[in-house]
Structure formats: C-alpha cells, structure tokens
Image (spheres, grey):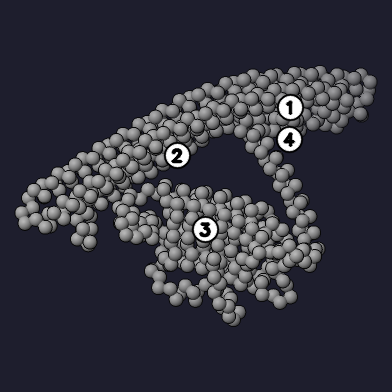
Amino acid sequence: MDEPVSQGSGDEMEEPVRGFLEEVNCPEPGIIDRQMIETAYLGEGQKGESGRLHQLEPVVYERIRTMRLEFKNLLRIDHLWMLPNLTKLCLNCNKIEVIEHIEMLTALKELNLSFNYITKIENLETLVNLETLSLFSNRIRRIENLSLKKLVILSIGNNLIDTVDGIERLRFLNSLKVLNLEGNPIAQKPDFPLSLYVTAILPKLNYYEYVFIKADTREAAQKRFYRELREIEDKQEREIQALETDAREAAEAERLASSFVEHLDGQQLYDSLWRDDENGRILMLVGAPAHELSEEYAKDIHQLTQSIYKLGLKRFGEREEEIRDFNANLQEGQQELQSLGQSQIEEFLQYKERTFEVLRSKLRELEESEDGSEEYSQVDTLNGQFDDALNEMWQSLMSQELHLHEAVEESTLNFHRKISQLMASFVEQAQVFFLQLRDVCGHFADNMTDIVTQFLSDKLSRQELGSVPKELTMCVDDREEVLKLVEGMRTAHTYRVEEREDRMAKRSKEFIDKMIQQLNNKEVDRHRAKILEINSFMEMMTEALGNLPRELNQE
C-alpha cells in the first residue's frame, strides 16, 4: 500500500509531494513515448536466461498487460493508445499534473498515480473495469468525477481535500470496499471525526484507512451523523429516480432517432403545422366549424404519422439485425486469421530458438578453431537459412493480412449495398405516407375555403358584419383574400410535411455514410497497425540474429 509522506507545517501541506520527488535522482522531465514503453517492457524484472530470451522477443503491444513507469520524471501521459489490453498501469513517483490520454484503456484494472502533482480527478469515466485507483500524495482538493462501478479500492490520502463534499457521491460506487483519506486537511480537524462520517454515509465500505469497520463502530457512526445520513439518502433516492427516468427517455429517444421517426409518435407533426402560421390562425377565427374540421384534420395526420412511426421501428429492427450479423462475421474472420498468424509466429519462434542454439554452438567452435573455414561456412549457411525462413514468414503473414484486408473491404462494400437497399426501401415506403399527408393538408385547405366562405356569406346575408373578426373583414367583399389566406396556410403546412420528409431522407443517408466511413477508418487503422506489427517482428528477429555474436562475447 502507499505510504504517506511526513506532515509538517501548513506550508508543507500545500506541497505534499515536492520534497519526496526532488530527493529522487530522476532523468530529464519528459512525456511517455513509444521508445519509453518498449524499454520499460523489455526491462521487466526477468533475470537470467528468461530475461535474455525476453529481450529477444518482439514487442507486440496488444500482448502487454502491465506497464511500470515509476521514477521517470514524467510530466505528461501519452502514447498509451498503443497498449489497448493493458490491465495494470503504474505511473507513481513522477511529476504528472493532469490525468489525460488514458480514456482508451478500457481493460485497465489497476491504476497507480500516487506521488505526482495532480490537482483534479478527471478523465476516468471510460475506465469501466478499473478496480484499484491510487491517487495518494497529490494536490487534489476535492473528490469528484468518480463513476467507476467496479472500483473496489480508492486511495486518495495525503492530498489537499478540506471538504466532505463529494464523499457522498461514493455511495453510487457499489463495489467500493476500501477507502483511504488519511493525511488530508479534512481528516485533521479535531472537532470532526472523518472516519465516523465516512463509516456512516458509506454503508458498503468494509475498510477505512485499511482498518476493518466493525459493526458497533458503524452503528455508532450512523447515530452520530443521523441527520446528515438521512439528508444524503433522501437526495440520493431522488437522484436515482431522476436518473432512471432520464435513462429511459434517453434510450427511447436514441431508439427513435436511429429509426428516423423521432417526434412522430404523437401529435408533434400536427402541432408543428400551425407553428408560425398566421394565415391559419386567422382562418380558425370563424369558430366552431373550423375547430371541428381541425379535429378531424388532427386525427388524419396522427393516423398517418403513426404508420410512419411503426414502419420506422420495424425497419430499424431489420437494419440492426443486419448490422449485428455483419459485425459478428467480420470479427469471426479476423479472429480466425489472427489465430492462424499467431500459430505461425509461435512455430517460427520455436524454430528460431533451435537455430540460435546451433548458431551459438558453431560460433563457439569458430572462436576455438584455428582454421575455422568449415565452421564459418556452417554459420553462414545457418544465417542464410534463417533469413530465408524469416522472409518466408514475412511473405506468409503479409499475404494473410492483405487477403484479410481485401476481404474486409469487399465485405464492407457488400454490406454497404445491402444496408443502402434496406434504407432505400424504408424511405420509399415512408414517402408514400408523406404523400398522403400532403393530400390531407390539401383537403383540409379546400374544406377550410368552403367553411370560411360560408361563414362570411352568412354574416353578410344577416347583416351581422360587426361580428366578423377584424382580421377577416377584408375578406367579406373579396373572395380572393380568402383564397390567399387559405393558400398561405396550405403552403405552410405542406412545407412542414416536406421538411420532415426531407430530414428523414437526409439523416438516413448520413447514417449510412457515417457508419461505412467509420468501418473503413477502423479497418485502415487495423491494417496499418498489423503491417507495423509484422514489420516490427521481422526487424526484431533480424536484430536478434545480428546481436548473437555480441551476446556470446558478453558471456
């Protein structure tokens, strides 16, 4: 476990790490780079023959599970995207100020950032598998941005935390069992027993400052902080309910958006027809007949939007199934070829060890031989055979990779065609309903013309022109004015329908273009990384062969 540094005056509290780090003989300040990662990996604590063999192994970044970069005088974190399967990362005892560039390490289980200059907890949200987090002895002032559901151990002692705000958020971390806050200003207040407060509000915590929390201690703590606990529980319950509601709404909104039928499950489209429609507002002033007509209008619009809505959800399910099948087949093909390549590499490494053993023997004989011509010829032959085998391996791996790359490109192209056909079919069917919506808008406008004309005619015949709404008085003696108002309403409503139709067609196309672009980009990145890995393996093997005489001399 992390050990706290000694505490002194208030000034020392502001710099809890500096004295410790400045006593260490560190290299020049720097940033994590590829060379540093390779050096750290090859310098892992393996000794003797196993250590020598480890040095000869090619660096395959995907295989690296642990990375230790302590006492490197690091200022910034970078290049860790090269280690996608990392499960343990030790960056303690450096000069790191910001937690950054680790969001891609989703397999990470243990992260040690102790004894640095970090001032804020941040950028950890994507580390969904993190179980142990040590931020001991930094410059952190508050607990925040911790939503790690699998976190078991949190060490954040010897920082500058002087408030309990944020501790209650740890209640949402259901797996948290061990917490350390010792050495913070909040833990040193004589009138505030922090250990009891933590014990009271974190009922699932088992250890505080690495001491087991007994049942009687927890009971006493909950009595001591009864009021605070009740307030926190009430607030948490309200928040949980709000989060659940938001999650349901967000999931439904995402589903509808992906179906391209959002805001078509109710009266949203109908309501939008009347938005900013001044002509329609004036026409509706004729009263009951117009309102009765609009009610029928609303029903017709709703019936058609419901048809589009149901169609969108049905076609969404079909597309999702197609996408799942494509991704599953793609992954299966990649894994199959990856396994084949891995088997070839392992066979070659066994061949390499056998060849190198023979070469070592022949090189020793060459050193002891007076003539050495025969041994030299044999060494030269073995070197040539190894180069040939290595070249054959390179050609095989590259051929497999190029074949996979071409197969993925072809599969993606076929998938593009199929998903485009599915989308086109959906849009075409939806356009039939949009055409009917435009017809409904037209029928409503025609009927509204008759209603308004009849209304004005009745008022004129009864000499009740005073009861005609002011906005319609200009229409009493001029039918063309009525037609202008109706046409303006018809145009506005039809425009809203066409706008929604165009948005569906545009977004469906953008969805396909974006998805295919992401697939292509992902494949390009994978292909480049694989080529780099193969060439790196070849270079490592060639280098190992070239270093063999020097290794024997060192022995």
Find disc 3 in the rendering and name its residue: 111
Residue at disc 4, secondary structure: loop
User: Alpha carbon of mark 4 to alpha carbon of mark 3: how far?
Assistant: 56 Å
Q: Is 411 located above or below residue 36 in the figure? A: above
Which residue is drawn at the image coordinates 50% and 32% (left, top)? Answer: 328
Q: Is residue 194 something one can see in this rendering?
A: yes
Q: Which mark is residue 522?
A: 2
Specify the amino acid type for callout 3: Leu
Which of the two labelled residues, at mark 3 and mark 2, occupies the earlier sequence position? 3
Residue at disc 2, secondary structure: helix
Which residue is drawn at the image coordinates 62% and 30% (left, top)? Answer: 259
Specify the amino acid type for callout 2: Lys
Mark 2 or 1, closer to the camera = 2
Q: Nearer the viewer, residue 186 or 288?
A: 186
Quadrant where the image shows the C terminus: bottom left
Which of the two labelled residues, at mark 3 and mark 1, occupies the earlier sequence position? 3
Specify the amino acid type for callout 4: Asp
Find disc 1 in the rendering and name its residue: 489
How many tags in the picture?
4
Q: Which mark is residue 276?
A: 4
Which residue is drawn at the image coordinates 48% and 55% (left, top)? Answer: 88
